[in-house]
Image (cartoon, helix red, strand yellow):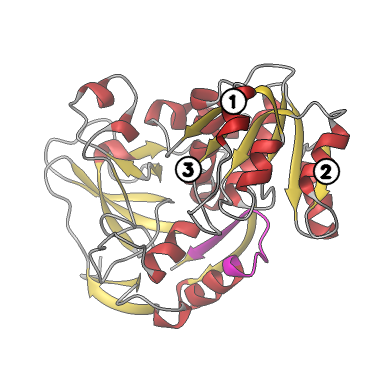
């Protein structure tokens, strides 16, 4: 095994052109850790935020981006049990103290010390990455490395939003924004699996057809029509029970208006801006709930992996690029020219 590795690095904040592929010493696992030989790593909007910089947040640059990946365990440190050299695994993107009340009750994202690979410490877009053994979860035999790198962050995010936070019930109506994105394409499938009627917004006819194929009952092309007017028309002016929101400033006000009485808006991000306006009259008069959501638990992730293995959920891979095209991956995300996930391979 060579003692060096290649990795994508964000050396400083800026445009996609700042990304570099560098050679670094290959890390070694310590006690309770494993060394993962990465076969595929996911690219997420989070990577673009890390690259551009986030107001009020100081990131430890230079940083290797990437939150999810899959591969083979190359070595295990002292005291590791349950995972061994040669195992096929996928990465649990989040980490926490694993000892506090939040962690022990399955609410790891509420841990004071919760963090994400590729945001709070070096991530997965490298030939090798050291992980806590608890972050290396078994990849089912019938799930490819590409699929294993495509589902962890986005499916866990969507599952936690719909199930744990919004409490989706069979027969409810759900509006999923950005159905062509990683979280959106996962949310369509999860909501359909759980018996909801699914409406989704996408940009363009090609994405509309793909969203329909994923199981969306109604697809709204936000480039051709107003999604609020269409949602009201498609629900007989009632509105939807749940809005899955990650667009932010651009869609926030109309998302609230798209809710039925007693509806829930659950949000995990703000790709178009974070200063959103809320008319409180609608909030209290209609009995609405605004719910924030970040990631989820490893228990949820294992449940999702089982559903992927059973082919009841399907990770959507738009394309696979080499590390050297990481900047192109960022440009494609910014241009919304992707349906599902982009992966990088060494």
Structural crowding at the residue carrying mark 3, measured as other residues with C-alpha within 10 Å and reported as few (<14), some (14–19) or many (≥20): many
The answer to whether 161 appears left or right of 21 in the picture is right
Q: Nearer the viewer, residue 33 or 105?
A: 105
From the viewer's perspective, is the residue at label 3 or at label 2 nearer?
2
Secondary structure of the residue carrying numbered label 3:
helix
Q: Residue furthest bottom?
A: 17
Where residue 146 sits: x, y (%)? 54, 53
Secondary structure of the residue carrying numbered label 1:
loop
Q: Quadrant of the N terminus?
A: bottom left
Q: Residue furthest top?
A: 170
Secondary structure of the residue carrying numbered label 2:
helix
137, above or below 93, in the image: above
Q: CA distance from mark 3 to mark 2?
A: 34 Å
Q: Which mark is residue 341?
A: none
Point 20% across, 44% down: residue: 33
Sequence order check, earlier mark of 1 and 3:
3
Q: Quadrant of the C terminus?
A: bottom left
**Which quadrant of the figure has residue 197?**
top right
Q: Which mark is residue 229?
A: 2
Q: Which mark is residue 288?
A: 1
Q: Nearer the viewer, residue 147 or 287?
A: 287
Sequence order check, earlier mark of 2 and 1:
2
Point 42% across, 33% down: residue: 296
Where residue 308 sits: x, y (%)? 59, 34
The answer to whether mark 2 and mark 1 are in CB contact below 8 A is: no
Q: Nearer the viewer, residue 189 or 279?
A: 279
Q: Which residues are magenta?
A: 333-344
Where residue 257 sits: x, y (%)? 69, 37
Residue underneath mark 3: 152
Q: How many marks?
A: 3
């Amino acid at each position: 095994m060579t003692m060096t590795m290649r990795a994508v690095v964000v050396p400083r904040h800026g445009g996609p052109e700042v990304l570099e592929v560098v050679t670094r010493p290959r890390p070694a696992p310590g006690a309770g850790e494993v060394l993962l030989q990465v076969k595929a790593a996911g690219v997420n909007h989070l990577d673009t935020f890390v690259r551009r910089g986030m107001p009020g947040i100081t990131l430890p640059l230079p940083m290797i981006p990437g939150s999810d990946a899959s591969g083979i365990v190359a070595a295990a440190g002292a005291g590791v049990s349950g995972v061994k050299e040669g195992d096929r695994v996928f990465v649990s993107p989040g980490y926490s103290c694993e000892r506090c009340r939040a962690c022990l009750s399955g609410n790891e994202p509420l841990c004071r010390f919760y963090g994400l690979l590729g945001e709070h410490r070096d991530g997965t877009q490298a030939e090798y990455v050291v992980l806590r053994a608890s972050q290396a979860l078994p990849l089912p035999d019938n799930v490819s490395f590409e699929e294993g790198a495509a589902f962890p962050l986005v499916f866990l995010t969507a599952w936690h939003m719909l199930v744990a936070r919004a409490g989706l019930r069979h027969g409810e109506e759900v509006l999923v924004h950005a159905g062509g994105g990683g979280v959106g394409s996962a949310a369509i499938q999860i909501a359909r699996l759980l018996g909801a009627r699914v409406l989704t917004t996408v940009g363009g006819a090609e994405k509309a057809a793909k969203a329909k194929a994923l199981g969306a009952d109604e697809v709204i092309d936000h480039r051709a029509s107003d999604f609020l007017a269409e949602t009201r028309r498609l629900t007989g002016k009632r509105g939807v029970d749940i809005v899955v929101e990650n667009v932010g400033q651009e869609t926030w006000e109309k998302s609230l208006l798209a809710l039925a009485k007693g509806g829930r808006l659950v949000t995990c991000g703000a790709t178009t801006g974070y200063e959103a306006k809320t008319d409180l009259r609608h909030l209290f008069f209609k009995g609405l709930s605004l719910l924030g959501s970040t990631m989820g638990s490893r228990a949820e992730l294992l449940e999702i992996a089982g559903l992927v293995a059973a082919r009841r959920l399907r990770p959507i891979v738009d394309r696979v690029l080499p590390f050297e095209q990481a900047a192109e991956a960022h440009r494609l995300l910014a241009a919304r020219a992707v349906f599902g996930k982009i992966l990088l391979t060494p």
